[in-house]
Amino acid sequence: MDDTRRIPADSALPGWLASLPPGWQPYAMLARWDRPVGIWLLYLPCLIGLMFQRLITGVYVMDLVWAVLFLLGATAMRGAGCTWNDITDRDIDASVSRTALRPIPSGAVTLRQAYLFLGAQLVVGFGVWLALPLDAKLIALLSVPLVAAYPFMKRVTWWPQAWLGLTFNWGVLVGAAVATTITLPVLVLYAGLILWTIAYDTIYALQDREDDALIGVRSTARLFGQRAVLISFCFHMGATALIALAAALNEAGRIGALTAILFLAHGIWQAARLKSSREQAALAVFKSNVWAGLIVVLGFALSAMAPEPKSRSLFAHHEIVLDTPPSTLDLPFGFKVKRPGPSPADPGETWFASAAMRALQREGIIGPSPDDITASDTP
């Protein structure tokens, strides 16, 4: 087959792919290196988890090293996942026009070669895994069953996008474990990112809805039918609510709130774009979710680096009672009034008690105090 005909029509980097040696091209397509959106969507949750927990500790220089290691690990493991997916889906891919020219169904890569390539990528991922702290190592290992089972989900459930959400966003737990530990706000954030994945992968599945129906593959795009765009936006709103809640629980402050607002605004734009194009822009809208993820990463990073200003109130703070009360009383909006209080000669009495004693003395009910008698005798 001519080399130019092996380049998929929907490749995101056809020029780069064509520039590779012919023997490398099938493996690059097998790992989807010519479609880096998937790498970003696997990589960004790792950064989100790391920056989310840095809201507590602050950002460290070492985080740059973690960011590089996460990128290397995401590239290797996303490629390994795609290779495993193509191995298990080779018969299905041969029946779908969009995937018929993938390396395994087209014969460009044999099944044995695909397994060897899978092993090589896992070795790279294992090297990154060795560099992680112990807690993060254990968390990362728990993702293996999710990755292994994902290709089969479309055969047994209408919700393979939810399983993908569990798998693709596992990095938020790993990133959090690298920073500090897994906390309740981290789990809330993880749940929000799962809803986000259901939203964007439903959009991606709109491209294959007809072919999936012919071969019996299930997806939320088929399940939601004509309301797929609306329901995917509802999942995006749910993701926004959970991201905002997690940010509030972790004291992300005003920047965290602004992050959630911008994330929601991006979801509104996605829904409007899909509606205006009658779902023809599904692939472009799906790819734009990289920017949605970057909004969350940058928002949490800025919140972690920028100190939150002290909160102010229109109302006065609670008064602290001192041994000697202050001479003025603070009121709302900066007003002050002079506080009636004891004279310097009577530091131990309150203003009310002093006035009452003087009134009783005037009426002759009680005699003058010893202090008054001493004062009157003084020349």
Image (cartoon, rainbow, N blue to C red):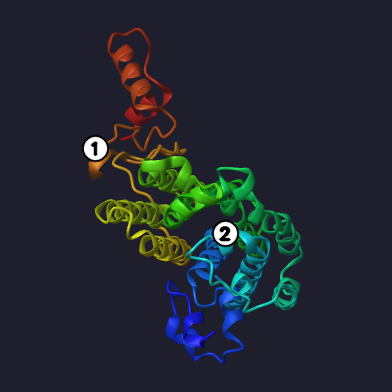
Name the residue carrying label 2.
53
In the picture as drawn, the residue positioned furthest to the front comes out as: 1
Of 363 and 343, nearer the camera is: 343
From the top left corner, tell me how far across and down residue 113 is, in percent: 72, 78
Image-based side of 207 in relation to 46, left or right: left
Q: Amino acid at mark 1?
A: Val
Quarter of the view holding residue 330: top left
Q: Residue at x 29, y 15 (%)?
A: 359
Q: Amino acid at mark 2?
A: Gln
Of 202 and 27, nearer the camera is: 27
Name the residue carrying label 1.
337
Q: Is residue 250 visible?
A: no
Of labels 2 and 1, earlier in sequence is 2
> Which of the two discs, 2 and 1, sits closer to the camera?
2
* Disc 2 to disc 1, C-alpha distance: 46 Å
Q: Is residue 368 above or below residue 74?
A: above
The quarter of the rendered structure image containing the N terminus is bottom right
Q: Residue at x 45, y 50 (%)?
A: 199
Q: Residue at x 63, y 76 (%)?
A: 107
From the top left corner, tell me how far across and down residue 351 is, in percent: 34, 26
Q: Is residue 90 visible?
A: yes
Does the CB distance between marks 2 and 1 fall below 8 Å? no
